[in-house]
Image (spheres, rainbow, N blue to C red):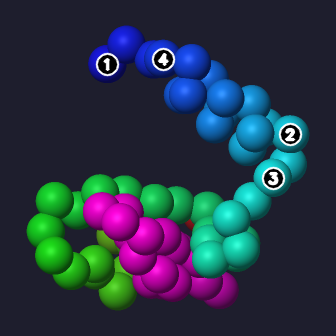
């Protein structure tokens, strides 16, 4: 992938501390390339499903996260 100006803009926006309200305090996201999101990600159980935006699933830390 060759980044374009919009990609740099989005990266700068996020680095400046901006967040999407829908995502909250999620630490992980992935595109599962399927219509549903797994309830847990990564496989070690440190994240639980929060929301899906477009093709991406977003996950919040669980209590297990402190052990990783």
Q: Quadrant of the N terminus?
A: top left
**Residue picked out by circle 3:** 18
The stretch in magenta equals: 45-66
CA distance separating discs 4 and 1: 9 Å
Contact check, label 2 and label 1, Cβ < 8 Å? no
Q: Which of marks 2 and 1 is nearer the N terminus?
A: 1
Q: Nearer the viewer, mark 2 or mark 4?
A: 4
Q: Label 1: state its secondary structure.
A: loop
CA distance separating discs 2 and 1: 23 Å
CA distance separating discs 3 and 4: 20 Å
The residue under the point 71% across, 74% down is: 21
Q: Which of marks 3 and 4 is nearer the N terminus?
A: 4
The residue under the point 75% across, 59% down is: 19
Q: In this view, does 32 lie above or below 51?
A: above
Q: Give neighbour class at mark 1: few <14, some 14-19, many 20+ (Cα, 10 Å).
A: few
**Disc assigned to residue 1:** 1
**Residue picked out by circle 4:** 4
């Amino acid at each position: 992938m060759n980044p374009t100006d919009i990609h740099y803009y989005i990266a700068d926006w996020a680095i400046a501390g901006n967040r999407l309200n829908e995502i909250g305090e999620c630490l992980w996201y992935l595109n599962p390339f399927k219509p549903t999101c797994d309830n847990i990600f990564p496989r070690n159980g440190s994240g639980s499903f929060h929301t899906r935006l477009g093709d991406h699933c977003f996950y919040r830390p669980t209590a297990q996260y402190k052990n990783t």
